[in-house]
Amino acid sequence: MRKFIAIGDVHADFDTMWAALRAASCADAQGRPTPPVQAGLFQVVLIGDLVHPKNEREYARVAGLPRFNASDPDHLTLAAREQARQLDRLREYQLQAPHAVHILLGNHDDAVLHPRFVLGTSSGLKHVEFDPAHGGVPLPAHLHEWMSTFLRELRVGSAGGDLHFAHVSPLPAHTHYDDLFYADHSPKRWFVDAPDYVRMAGLQYGVYGHTQIQGGILLEDDHRFAMIDALQSREYLELMFDPASTDPVRAVRAVPF
């Protein structure tokens, strides 16, 4: 029996991410993996989108400014440096328990690694702090190398993967963030329009992020999946998994912290 602790999209809110890891007994006060994580009994999954604060207020907090101006290269540099500092800390955490700490590649992470698209918010805020072509600074080389190892999906269990984690959905097309991905509405709508995708993929259970859920984590019991982009609601997902059982997903719950 193993316990999976899955945390939704971070979007540079690393303080809340660390609070979740501490609450789940996955990180100690110094940000190191706890003994259950080191032993592999606890498996940590970060669902992706580590970077890019969600709004100007969050950018100001990250950059340590009273107000954030996305057109000011100095402001972009401050936002990029603080995110890089926090990514370094998370990198050290994962390197101490790579067998038990899994980080998925979100579309915002991919946009930092391969700045082909300028991502933004509905309010017009552009995420360009790591894009030198738009006034930002490049991601440090060692972080670029590390983030390039992030998984596009994590499958656990039998050959087909009884338990599935991905940033967006169970669809393979949703693990590649190209122009078709951004032109398609299904990455934000699949769990409403086609919730049978998890069963159609032959999965026992799926855990996904990408779409912010109001009111906390969404547990879809009938269709056997969870939508966990709810870090802002201070919740993480806890899942007990027994690979020796015919029904390996033993319990799933949203945990407030």
Image (cartoon, grey):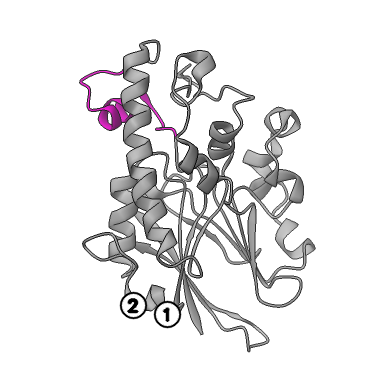
Find disc 1 in the rendering and name its residue: 39
Q: Residue 212, relative to residue 28: is it above or below?
A: above
How far apart in space, not on screen, are marks 1 and 2 (Cα)?
A: 6 Å
Amino acid type of the residue tagged 2 in the rendering: Pro
Q: Quadrant of residue 79?
A: top left
Residue at position x 25%, y 18% in the image: 67
Where the C terminus falls, by quadrant? bottom left
Q: Residue 226, relative to residue 174: is it above or below?
A: below
Residue at position x 58%, y 66% in the image: 221
- Local crowd at mark 1 within 10 Å, few (<14), some, or many (≥20)? few
Q: Residue 110, relative to residue 115: is it above or below?
A: below
From the top left corner, tell me how far across and down residue 245 is, in percent.
Answer: 63, 88
Q: How many marks?
A: 2
Residue 58 vs residue 26, the one in the foreground: 26
* Circle 1/circle 2 CB separation < 8 Å: yes
Q: Residue 168, relative to residue 57: is it above or below?
A: below
Question: Is 56 included in the stretch rendered in magenta?
Answer: yes
Question: Is 218 included in the stretch rendered in magenta?
Answer: no
Is residue 20 among what the camera can see?
A: yes
Residue 193 vs residue 44, the one in the foreground: 44
Q: Secondary structure at mark 1?
A: loop
The stretch in magenta equals: 52-68
From the top left corner, tell me how far across and down residue 52 is, in percent.
Answer: 44, 33
Find disc 2 in the rendering and name its residue: 35
